[in-house]
Amino acid sequence: MGYFIGLIIVILLISIRQVNEYQRGVKFQLGKFVRVVSPGWRLVVPVFQSMTKVDMRVKAVDVPYQEAITRDNISAKINAVIYYKVGDAGKAILEVENFWFAVSQLAQTTMRNVVGEMELDELLANRESAAEKIKTIVDKASDPWGIMVESVELKDVVLPDDMQRTIAKQAEAERERRAVIIKSEGEKSAAQNLADAAEMLGRQPGALHLRTLNSLNDLSSDQSNTVIFAVPLEILRSFERMNNN
């Protein structure tokens, strides 16, 4: 009798399975799905029953570099990280063999397809948009597996060396173009100011002479300057008329 009781105790001890708070247990009996068990100590009878634990925490999967061709036929290597978690532990075990591997493969394929629908400039300028498209497609495709995609982040976009040099030249040309525009706008503004000043001086009698005298006063402060004073033509003609008389 004691031997029988001891055997029962041993069977009970080896039948106890602990399911942690962040896990769910998918329980089978004689190979058939029974239910998903919640955290705690659970009894799993050897031989007749089995249980697979599923981690329900958010997982970060690094999607390796993928060679993709953009819509404008430019080769690029893209890698990303996808954050997802198991929403339905039963589906994650029953509907797909290895959900971790399946999500990674799905993300790789989707990433190549999404990049192929975008031009390079659009991809570089709108990474968030590309990541959102990848997230939407992967989330919808993985719904039958009980997977919930939290977010997708594009980590890096690597371009061929010749394309990097081309983009650098384009950026330099754009900076030069902006510099020329700014310089021309400054010259235009300066010319307009000079024209306004000349018009203002021309409207006021004697204003030009006062401006000339002011310039001479500024030049006289430095003794090393040589000043050539231009006599207005009207004054010379006045002297000429006086001599003729």
Image (spheres, rainbow, N blue to C red):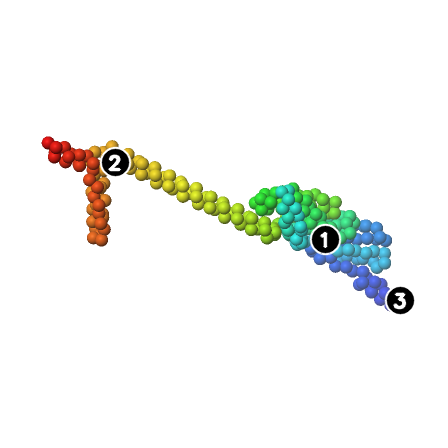
Residue extending farthest to the right is: 1
Residue toward you, 136 or 35 = 136
Disc on res. 48: none
Disc on res. 201: 2
Q: Secondary structure at mark 3?
A: loop
Badge 2 local density, few (<14 within 10 Å), some, or many (20+)? some
**Image side of residue 225 versus residue 189, left or right:** left
Q: What amino acid is labelled 3 in the image?
A: Met
The quarter of the picture where the C terminus appears is: top left
**Cα–Cα gap, marks 3 and 1:** 49 Å
Badge 3 local density, few (<14 within 10 Å), some, or many (20+)? few
Q: Secondary structure at mark 2?
A: helix
**Residue positioned 66% across, 44% down in the render:** 116
Q: Nearer the viewer, mark 3 or mark 2?
A: 2
**Residue positioned 72% across, 50% down in the render:** 105
**Image side of residue 126 versus residue 40, left or right:** left
Q: Is residue 128 visible?
A: no
Q: Is residue 245 visible?
A: yes
Find disc 3 in the rendering and name its residue.
Answer: 1
Considering only order in the chain, which callout, 2 or 1, is on the residue closer to the N terminus?
Answer: 1
On the image, which quarter does residue 44 sit in? Answer: bottom right
- Residue 24, given in percent of the width and then of the height, sits at 73, 53
Considering only order in the chain, which callout, 1 or 3, is on the residue closer to the N terminus?
Answer: 3
